Amino acid sequence: METKVGSLDSCRAATCNDVGCLPSNGSVSALHSSAPPPFNSAEATLGRHLARRLVQIGATDVFSVPGDFNLTLLDHLIAEPGLNLIGCCNELNAGYAADGYARARGVGACVVTFTVGGLSVLNAVAGAYSENLPVICIVGGPNSNDYGTNRILHHTIGVPDFSQELRCFQTVTCCQAVVNNLEDAHELIDTAISTALKESKPVYISISCNLPAIPHPTFSREPVPFSLSPRLSNKMGLEAAVEAAAEFLNKAVKPVMVGGPKLRVAKAGGAFVQLADASGYALAVMPSAKGLVPEHHPHFIGTYWGAVSTAFCAEIVESADAYLFAGPIFNDYSSVGYSLLLKKEKAIIVQPDHVSIGNGPEFGCVLMRDFLIGLSKRLKKNTTAYENYHRIYVCEGQPSKGEPKEPLRVNVMFQHIQKMLSGETAVIAETGDSWFNCQKLRLPQGCGYEFQMQYGSIGWSVGATLGYAQAVPDKRVIACIGDGSFQVTAQDVSTMIRSGQKTIIFLINNGGYTIEVEIHDGPYNVIKNWNYTGLVDAIHNGEGKCWTTKVRCEEELIEAIGTATGDAKDCLCFIEVIVHKDDTSKELLEWGSRVAAANGRPPNPQ
């Protein structure tokens, strides 16, 4: 972690005239052969430099909430032709939107005001940190003349120390830059942004409110595109790790491989598939890696999530005599209350820059992508685990046919959502029972999928849907959101309508925090029922394109989906689905009881 206040240390971004540009996919473009042209002096400002930097790295949409300390900066962002400023209803949703945008584009950005805005967006930034997403969090800070004085400012806690916000961000960002003079502003901003891209973590940039509009010689030329030196594996360590892993796996009778969420930060999804193609191993994903591995792969066997895995997947993984996990996170949620039936001596754990093999050797400075590619050339073909899966697999049954106008069941609803999916859609799953129901969706080639498992902040999906849909306007986003979560962040449906998005939101109204009911029930899990379609209609207020409906039975759901994909295909569609409060997936029932047991463990004897 780095903090930069008015100076730049050894982490300075390397810049020169012959450098490449880092697009959102993390690759470096062809070299530039000439220096960028100079600006006229009126354009040579900090605000314009920051705007151009954001456009260069792919953050062409920036989510913001105005406040008096960031207004001048917002003027300069708006003036940048390639940048679109999107005003959000609150800072938390602006941060969630930047998170969703980063999942699709590779980087996201938000702009808020000092302390009251910064501490509000902090929760979203922490979630982005946990999910390894490069989010540029920009805060309009106090006038530079107020630093070092005993003045007390508004939007603070009433003391002349302005560092409270900075200290809060230090634990959830990989670099912090406090820009309160122009002499080193260029270096501070570039260092922070390049660090976010290199580390794939959020960064914090505070810019004094009186600086964005002042011309300065350091901003007199078009920003030179970043050239980020690629990380390299230790060659000897890589060779040793590949040799040890190949020996380990080639001895196994029925090895399997499982993809984890850190495949994204390691940019190793393609290498993982290459290894699957070469080895013939049965291929599964951890729940938080759904969408990172193609489910149309011929050896794909589903989601490995212990006792709540998709059908027959856990049996194949846990009975294997060797398993390779690429980028896993084993926490209490992903391990179903620490109940996975895995043995360390059978496992190869591949992290973005580290490989562990059983109870034996460990290899550092070995990049996941290099390791997986190298291993793919050394493994013997072994399809035994997949053949076993194919042999025991029994096709899952369909939900029982209901009576006409029978109250809608959740499993019937997701049967119809499955039919909506294609390469032109993406699914956003909110924290709650949608985690489990959406895990069972089979994603067609090109279909996006996102959810926030590590941090699990309820309400995340509303802002994330806004950001993701803005980042990939050619896809239609399908968001599955529970009523309790929606009540936390509902306001930014307004921003979706204002931005002309055509998302389909399924609001699952079951009267409370169902996921928490299954962990530990109490009256606090029951919420006040809203007229959700009425709320969205009021937000719509006749401006923009929005269509809403309530459904209570399968016939109404079929009709609603038909309208959403037909006459209302260019609208934001909000479908409130009313279901029984106890209608949950069987996976949530199992998972909830195991997580409850883990939470309720008594203290160890002292």
Image (tube, helix red, strand yellow):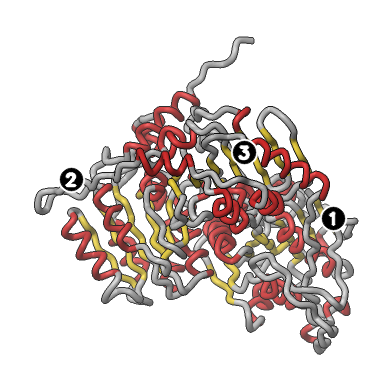
Counting from the top left corner in percent of width and height, residue 566 is at 27, 74
Secondary structure, mark 1, is loop
Residue type at mark 1: give it: Thr
Secondary structure, mark 3, is helix
Q: Is residue 521 left or right of residue 133?
A: left
Residue type at mark 3: give it: Leu
Gap between marks 3 and 1, in whole Å? 64 Å
First reached walking from the N terminus: tag 3 or tag 1: 1
584 above or below 177?
above
Please name the residue that numbered disc 3 is placed on. 249
- Mark 3 or 1: in front is 3
Image quarter where the C terminus lies is top right
Counting from the top left corner in percent of width and height, residue 83 is at 62, 77
Please name the residue that numbered disc 2 is placed on. 400
Please name the residue that numbered disc 1 is placed on. 149
Q: Quadrant of residue 117?
A: bottom right
Q: Which mark is residue 537?
A: none
At 64% from the left and 71% from the top, the residue drawn is 58
At 23% from the left and 64% from the top, the residue drawn is 560
Q: How many marks?
A: 3
First reached walking from the N terminus: tag 1 or tag 2: 1
First reached walking from the N terminus: tag 3 or tag 2: 3
Evaluate if marks 1 and 2 touch, with contact meaning CB atoms under 8 Å apart.
no
Q: Nearer the viewer, residue 61 or 292?
A: 292
At 49% from the left and 26% from the top, the residue drawn is 599
- Label 3 environment density (alpha carbons within 10 Å; few <14, some 14–19, many ≥20): many
Q: Nearer the viewer, residue 469 or 85?
A: 469
Q: Is residue 26 left or right of residue 6?
A: left
Counting from the top left corner in percent of width and height, residue 176 is at 76, 55
At 36% from the left and 37% from the top, the residue drawn is 587
Residue type at mark 2: give it: Ser
Residue 142 seen in render:
no
